Image (cartoon, rainbow, N blue to C red):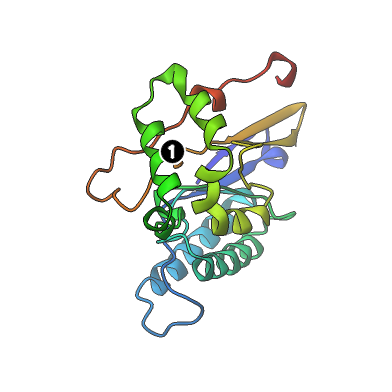
Amino acid sequence: MSSTANDAESKHLFLHLSDIHFSRQDYDPYDLDKDLRNQLALDAQTVVKELGNVTAILVTGDIAFSGIEPQYKVASQWLNSLADLLGCHPKVILVTPGNHDINRGCYDADEDLRRYQERLRTSQPDEVVDVLQSAGTKLYEPLKSYNQFAGEFGCEINYDRPCWDRTLELGHDITLRFRGLNSVLACNANDDANPKRLSLGEHQVQVDDADQ
């Protein structure tokens, strides 16, 4: 947890989480990670009591374990409860996907998807945009359940919106801009054997002068 402030009244706290890996569906008495999540929430609550409420919760990838809808249902419930517990209001929860947030079953079932992913992994930097345009929405199909979850927080990504932007007005003429990048379009069921499959693309990191 980090903070930035001009004075005591303008302090802003941001809670950064990653690799939560929700793998259970609904209530499960054998969920071994439940206590870890409870301890995380209690620790964060202790810090909030000392420093003040949380401005935003940032979750940078691997929210789910295998990218299926029931895992995101549990993740959504937990994150919303955490936001309430930490006084994050209005609920500013910003999420980006990790390689476990794709539905890996899509890769096995779709030959076209496998072909476009292989082209994306082997293309030169100046060829990436051409591959993405040729693939259209196909490369985003494994992120369907993730996008349903992320859409609750305005952080969905798709062919027309490959990354998201969010601006927070912090007061004292300070504006903080977040950009949620997507590096998982080339990820699939073979990641464990060959983990070097994350691909970003320069089109996501370019910022128009008019937007600054």
The C terminus appears in which quarter of the rendering? top right
Image point (77%, 26%), residue name? 173
On screen, residue 59 versus residue 151, left or right, reads left
Which residue is at the far top?
Answer: 209
- Amino acid type at circle 1 is Tyr
Where in the figure is residue 204, as x and y percent of width and height? Answer: 55, 28
Position of residue 4 relative to residue 27, above or below, is above
Which residue is at the far bottom?
Answer: 29
Where in the figure is residue 153, as x and y percent of width and height? Answer: 67, 53
On screen, residue 107 versus residue 196, left or right, reads right
Which residue is at the far left?
Answer: 193
When asked about the image quadrant of residue 28, the answer is bottom left
Which secondary structure, mark 1? helix
Where in the figure is residue 171, as x and y percent of width and height? Answer: 77, 34
When asked about the image quadrant of residue 19, the answer is bottom left
On screen, residue 174 versus residue 130, left or right, reads right
Image point (56%, 55%), residue name? 144
Q: How many labels does the image show?
A: 1
Residue indicated by mark 1:
116
Where in the figure is residue 50, as x and y percent of width and height? Answer: 57, 54
Which residue is at the far front?
Answer: 111
User: Between 139 and 16, which is closer to the camera in this rendering?
Assistant: 139
User: Between 134 and 144, which is closer to the camera in this rendering?
Assistant: 134
Crowding at dot 1, Cα within 10 Å, few <14 / some 14-19 / many 20+, comes out as many
Image point (56%, 59%), residue name? 145
